[in-house]
Image (tube, rainbow, N blue to C red):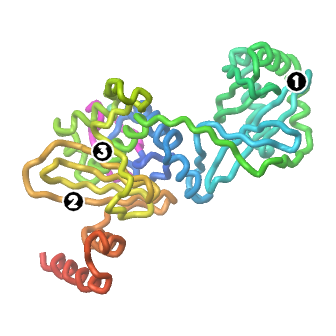
Amino acid sequence: MDVVESEICIYCRQPGYSREHNPPASLGGNCVLSCVCTQCNKTLSAIDQGLAENSPVAVSKAAFTPPAAFCTHVGGEASTVDQFGLTLGVRVGNEMKTHVRPQFFLDGNSLKARTADRDGISELIAHIDKQISEGKLADTYIEVNAEFRVPRFLMHRSTESYVSASSIEDAEHLLRVLQAQWPDIRNNLLTCEEVKVETRQPSVLMKLTMRPNDEFRGVAKIAFEAAALLCGPQFVLRPTFDPIREYIMGDVRLPPIDPANPEALAIDARFVRRIVDCPVKFTDQHGVLLIAGAAGILGLVILYGEHCYSVTLAPRQDGEPWMRCYEFSYTKDGHHEIDQLDFARRALERFPEQLKIAKENIPYLLNIIQKNKAGR
Ligand SMILES: [Zn+2]
């Protein structure tokens, strides 16, 4: 069900609707907002990907997402070695399950296929049929890497592929063999028996590319959209939200190089910061806490109950301070606002030491909060 609707987009203020997931569907978010236009939804999906696949969050995503939740995989590159010594490209999915990507290896003048199952073979056939019919096979992206003495043609996503080889010549040779022998190879693939691939090493080598600026923009987007969800689209359309809106849309300002620390990553930390020891971990799922007070409108974003970030959403506001809190499940179990009593209960139960409250006094305190709430 769509929970927020708006005539105009909360990013570009143009009319138009699309189904925007918050947090992104790639993190299991199933709260749908209809206040983002199709164009912004599409443009901003790159930062969603940066957060879900190219940040430390990617590892939690693969480790904790149950198989029944959205099919998700870690980005970057992962590989393992099979019983024939071939380095197989693998996808790392839910609960760190590995899945062999559809791929070919060039052995002399013949091609060997490796896939996880029959679906992988079908995927490979459909993709190469399409590339050949459109005359695009020879234009396949080539990655030169000394590790790949055996040239490899690998499906990267269901519609994209690339070749890894130790030289351009080897890669081009593989593409020529594939093109010339395709009718025979295709036929063999359709009729071949499945051979179970065993990995010689019980380990997977993962190479993740980190994109901290996209990660931070993705986090800002989650907090910003949670504000639209909790306070309405008109609230975040106020001009005081323009700086964070522009930041999410791409106004990233990298700091100048510090001569004392020239190796440091250039990160725009104007709005988002990572919190190492978060004092208010109110959820084991995804959650956003919004606090409006003297310091402005601040967001605390928690992902997988583990990764915590603070987000400065807007400058100081007039009026009474307030707090709202929202929890999003990453297992398709839904999403809901956490009421203040529940929030207080979670805070009291989890952080009695920080709050300097004896555990035995917690029921008494909760009772008082409950009574105050009822009497309001
Ligand atoms: Zn828009």
- The span from disc 1 to disc 3 (Cα, nearest Å) is 52 Å
Q: State whether the magenta stretch is mostly helix, strand or loop.
A: loop
Residue ID for mark 1: 183
Q: Please tell me which of labels 3 and 2 falls first in the chain.
A: 3
Q: Quadrant of the C terminus?
A: bottom left
- The span from disc 2 to disc 1 (Cα, nearest Å) is 64 Å
Q: Quadrant of residue 138?
A: top right
Callout 3 amino acid = Phe
Residue 298 drawn at (x, y percent): 24, 49
Residue 5 counted in the magenta span? yes
Q: Quadrant of residue 112?
A: top right
User: What number of labels is visible?
Assistant: 3
Q: Is mark 1 within 8 Å of ligand 1?
A: no
- For the residues bearing labels 3 and 2, Cβ distance under 8 angstroms: no
In magenta, the rendered stretch is: 1-20
Residue ID for mark 2: 323
Q: Is residue 39 above or below residue 352?
A: above
Q: Is residue 12 above or below residue 71?
A: above
Q: Please tell me which of labels 2 and 1 falls first in the chain.
A: 1
- SS class, disc 2: strand
Residue ID for mark 3: 224
Residue 18 drawn at (x, y percent): 40, 39
Which numbered tag is attached to residue 22? none
